[in-house]
Amino acid sequence: MGTLHVLHKYDSSIGYKFRPNLNIAYHPDKTGIAFHHIKTGPDGFRCCHSIDSFNASTKKRILVIGCSFTAGHGVSNEHRFTDLVEQDSNMILFNAAMPGTGNDQQLLIMKSLLEAGLKPDAILMTAYIGCSNRNQQHERSTYDVLTEGTVSRPKPYFELQQGQLRLYNVPVPHWKSTESPQNTKGFLSRVIARITPRIFTTTYASPNPLGRRLTASIFTKMHRLSKTAGAEFILAPVPSAKDLNPLSHFFSHRFYSKLASQLGCRFFDLHHALAAAQTAGMHSLYIQNDGHFSKRGHQVVAQSLRRLLEQ
């Protein structure tokens, strides 16, 4: 059984979720990721709060939506920025991030939790800025470090029709293995993808505006759901190490600042805190040979977000 099947299970509306109530030690080989613990809650997220315990809290309740950066890929639960923000604060954070997802799947996760009765005071969107590139994909191929093969995971997706979002590929088809460990071409393509410089993500700089329109429509729907739930909607997109490049930051910042202005919501640019920490020569903010936040990276993000959320 591969890593993906150990941690995740099929979900017909989103594609997959974490297996509930996991408490496992995890140390994948052939990566820069250190030994760490993964704990999940009863609702299929890497969050120890249940919907009921979250709702019962008298603290400020914050639902956090995102991908693997927010889920804490590569670090134990207690080292993630969501858990660090919670410590010694008057806030409780429900981490509903799902690795490998696009903004489309993140919208569906938010919608499902609100329909299940989750009652947040605020909804914090901390998706990796590259998640927007996944919004036009119908499936994603993921390398499994245990089997050294590739698993193709179909996903739900939206199309814009006459200015309205229309959902497709639901129920989501089941996963399928698409590559054997001996598939040299597939291995080389992964290596090339890792070493090729990426100045900016496709969506924000492409001459074709379709990806930006689709992404903006997805976030607009999130904002509407938040308002209906009586929760503040906050945009705080997460940059990778490559996205700290000034040109990449220009395109993503332009998109999100304009979108936040149109929606009338708060926009927090994490680029400034991460770039400043990197300039100051702090220990690596990202896991070497992996790209997700290190413990130090989570600490920098937590310090910045705590000040934002306390306002």
Image (spheres, helix red, strand yellow):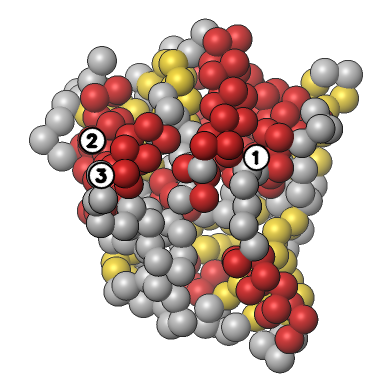
- Which amino acid type corresponds to the residue marked 1 in the rendered image? Ser
Q: Position of residue 50 (x, y in %)?
A: 33, 43
What residue is shown with label 1?
132
- Which amino acid type corresponds to the residue marked 2 in the rendered image? Gln
Q: How far apart are marks 3 and 1 (CA)?
A: 30 Å
Is residue 68 rendered to the left or right of residue 95?
Answer: right
* 132, above or below 298, in the image: above
Indicate the secondary structure of the residue bearing disc 1.
helix
Q: Which of marks 2 and 1 is nearer the N terminus?
A: 1
Q: Can residue 290 be seen by looking at this rendering?
A: yes
Q: Which of marks 2 and 3 is nearer the N terminus?
A: 3
Q: How far apart are marks 2 and 1 (CA)?
A: 26 Å
What residue is shown with label 2?
303
Compare residues 251 and 112 and report the one nearer the observer. 251
Residues at marks 3 and 1 touching, judged by CB atoms closer than 8 Å: no
Compare residues 69 and 152 and report the one nearer the observer. 69
- Which amino acid type corresponds to the residue marked 3 in the rendered image? Ala
Question: Quick one: quadrant of the N terminus?
Answer: bottom right
What residue is shown with label 3?
280
User: What residue lies at 46% left-to-right and 82% top-to-bottom?
Assistant: 30
Residues at marks 2 and 1 touching, judged by CB atoms closer than 8 Å: no
Is residue 47 rendered to the left or right of residue 113?
Answer: left
Compare residues 23 and 103 and report the one nearer the observer. 103
User: What residue lies at 54% left-to-right and 27% top-to-bottom?
Assistant: 253
Is residue 158 rendered to the left or right of residue 268?
Answer: right
User: What residue lies at 88% left-to-right and 19% top-to-bottom?
Assistant: 162
Q: Distance between the residues labelled 2 and 3?
A: 16 Å
Q: Where is residue 245 in the image (x, y as percent from the top left)?
A: 51, 43
Q: In the rendering, which numbered label is found on residue 251?
A: none
Q: Position of residue 229 (x, y in %)?
A: 48, 17
Indicate the secondary structure of the residue bearing disc 2.
helix
* 155, above or below 161, in the image: below
